[in-house]
Image (cartoon, helix red, strand yellow):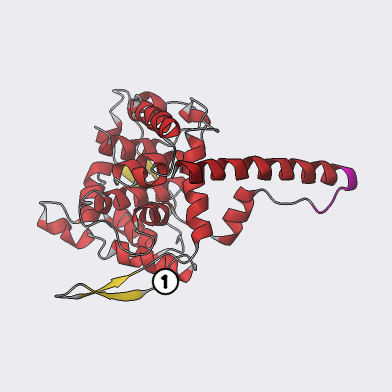
Amino acid sequence: MSEASGLVFRRNVVKTQENGASSLDSDRDGKDKEPEPEDVDSKETRLTLMEEVLLLGLKDKEGYTSFWNDCISSGLRGCILIELAIRGKVELEKAGMRRRSLCNRKVLVKNDSPCGDVLLDEALKHIKDTEPPETVQSWIEYLSGETWNPLKLSYQLKNVRERLAKNLVEKGVLTTEKQNFLLFDMTTHPLVDNVAKTRLVKRLQESVLSKWTNDPNRMDKRLLALIFMAHASDVLENAFSPLNDDDYELAMKRVRELMDLDFEAESAKPNANETMWAVIASFVK
């Protein structure tokens, strides 16, 4: 497995050299510049944060998540809140003079225009229709159906994993099959687009290895959220397991550094997304 990982990083070097050469050619003639791999990724398969976390959790050939993973359900609901925040749909109420903590501040709708995603629009409608507003932690419980409040049970987002898997099928990343498990049949979604998942795993690996900034404020918000939420959903290990021992140890060390951050302080920095940090704080306690 370590040899495969080595091949991944050597290919990156070759690609970087090729991109550099094409950039110089482009400077000479002013045209025909090759897009960066990240640009290609954004044009070919634009995945939401929820879809990326689910893709990390799915077994490639079997097409289902581990039966022992009891974290991914609430983790995906947290991803929905962060996705809404990154898209500028929701925000936290102002901290006020007493500087209330992230977990005690309410979620407010900032822009109620449709997102074009059924799950996001469903969650946004619930948040918009709720008075008085609720905290991030409350919304994770409501959307997961883990609330003790019977009046909020209707807020549960049902069949989230299956609906996300169908989105990935429509995007050509997964396919749909039926598997027999002796006593019952189950719909599964094996991987068909290895390139999409390879890119996703590579981005995560590079974010804590070759492209590590040691400053969360300088990291891409979506990628930073992916690291935290993949960890909260117990699927981050799947991205790091192909690494050799030294790289794996370094990657996990840097992930632990992220988990030990002062989330209140990070949320107060310029250009920080407070809702994102509130969701992260709800999972990393």
Q: In which quarter of the image is residue 24?
A: top right
Q: Which of 64 and 36 is in front in this view?
A: 64
For the question of whether residue 22 can be seen, the reply is yes
Say which amino acid is labelled 1: Thr
**Vertically, is 62 above or below 223?**
below
Give the x, y percent position of residue 159.
Answer: 27, 65
Question: Residue 119 at what x, y percent from top left?
Answer: 36, 62
Q: Quadrant of residue 260?
A: top left
Question: To which quarter of the image does residue 18 belong?
Answer: top right
Q: Which residue is drawn at 46% across and 67% down?
A: 192
The answer to whether any part of residue 131 appears in the image is: no
User: Does the magenta-highlighted stretch encompass residue 158?
Assistant: no
Q: Could you tell me what secondary structure mostly forms the magenta stretch?
A: loop
The residue carrying mark 1 is 175
128 up-or-down from 212: above or below: below
Above or below 99: residue 156: below
31 to the left or right of 158? right
